[in-house]
Image (cartoon, helix red, strand yellow):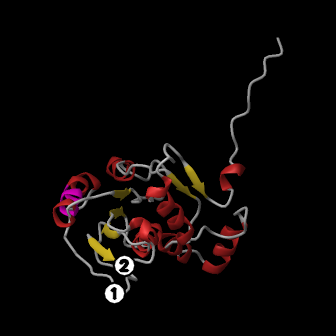
């Protein structure tokens, strides 16, 4: 677990404490940086708590956590509350993926993937380190990236900062009346999904 204390450039998050799961890289790190930039005292929760690409001005607080979402969730909240005295915002960003077919993955791998809850921001294919690692395994990584970008409606992958901006908006006190929303940040990819057709009864 790490803590980021950024400059108070915007007052809407002044005095608020935020926790971001899966915050060491990708969408989580971008969200943590944006919340910190807007003035929140931001804590990162990750299976690997070592900060990555963190500016030197951020104070970092580390704790070794046991592996697995069930073992770290409640304890992480307790650590933040006992250290900071409060917890106002929780961003459930952590995600785990698996490769291969159904037969390739055993029960433990299924549990590892499905134990992570889904949050309200629905990003498309984002340009994260995880995607970069997948592309690097291709015979021609650049050609694979080009093909992936061409499949996106807007011709490019979703930027982590774009997702972070939406996360910060939904977490802000200024959006207090926005509730129960599932917000896609996917470059219109959701409009291209094939939906089941209606069955027409012509009697």
Main secondary structure found in the magenta portion: helix
Judge from the rendering whether residue 159 lies leftward or rightward of residue 1; answer left or right.
right
SS assignment at label 2: loop
Q: Nearer the viewer, residue 183 or 97?
A: 183
Question: Nearest the camera: 12 or 56?
Answer: 12
Between discs 2 and 1, the one toward the N terminus = 2
Q: Which residue is mark 2?
A: 6
Q: Quadrant of residue 149?
A: bottom right
Range drawn in magenta: 75-80
Residue 187 in sight in this render: yes
In the image, residue 79 sits, relative to residue 111, either above or below, namely below
**The C terminus, quarter of image:** top right
Is residue 140 visible to us here? no
Q: Which residue is mark 1?
A: 57
- Tell me: residue 180, above or below residue 42: above
- Residue 52 appears at what percent x and percent y? 37, 80
* Displayed quadrant of residue 16: bottom left
The structure residue drawn at horizontal position 32% and vertical position 70%, both measured from the top left corner, is 41
């Amino acid at each position: 677990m790490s803590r980021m204390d950024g400059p108070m450039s915007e007052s809407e998050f002044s005095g608020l404490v935020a926790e971001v799961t899966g915050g060491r890289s990708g969408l989580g790190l971008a969200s943590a940086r944006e919340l910190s930039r807007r003035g929140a005292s931001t804590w990162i929760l990750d299976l690997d708590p070592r900060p990555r690409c963190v500016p030197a001005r951020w104070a970092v607080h580390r704790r070794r956590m046991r592996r697995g979402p069930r073992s770290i969730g409640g304890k992480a909240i307790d650590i933040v509350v006992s250290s900071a005295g409060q917890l106002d915002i929780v961003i459930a960003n952590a995600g785990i993926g698996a490769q291969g077919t159904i037969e390739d993955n055993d029960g433990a791998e299924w549990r590892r993937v499905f134990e992570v809850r889904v949050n309200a921001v629905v990003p498309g294919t984002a340009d994260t380190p995880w995607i970069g690692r997948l592309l690097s395994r291709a015979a021609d990584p650049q050609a694979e990236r080009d093909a992936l970008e061409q499949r996106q409606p807007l011709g490019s992958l979703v930027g982590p900062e774009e997702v972070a901006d939406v996360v910060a908006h939904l977490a802000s006190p200024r959006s207090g009346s926005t509730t129960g929303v599932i917000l896609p940040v996917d470059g219109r990819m959701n409009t291209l999904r094939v939906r089941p057709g209606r069955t027409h009864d012509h009697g």
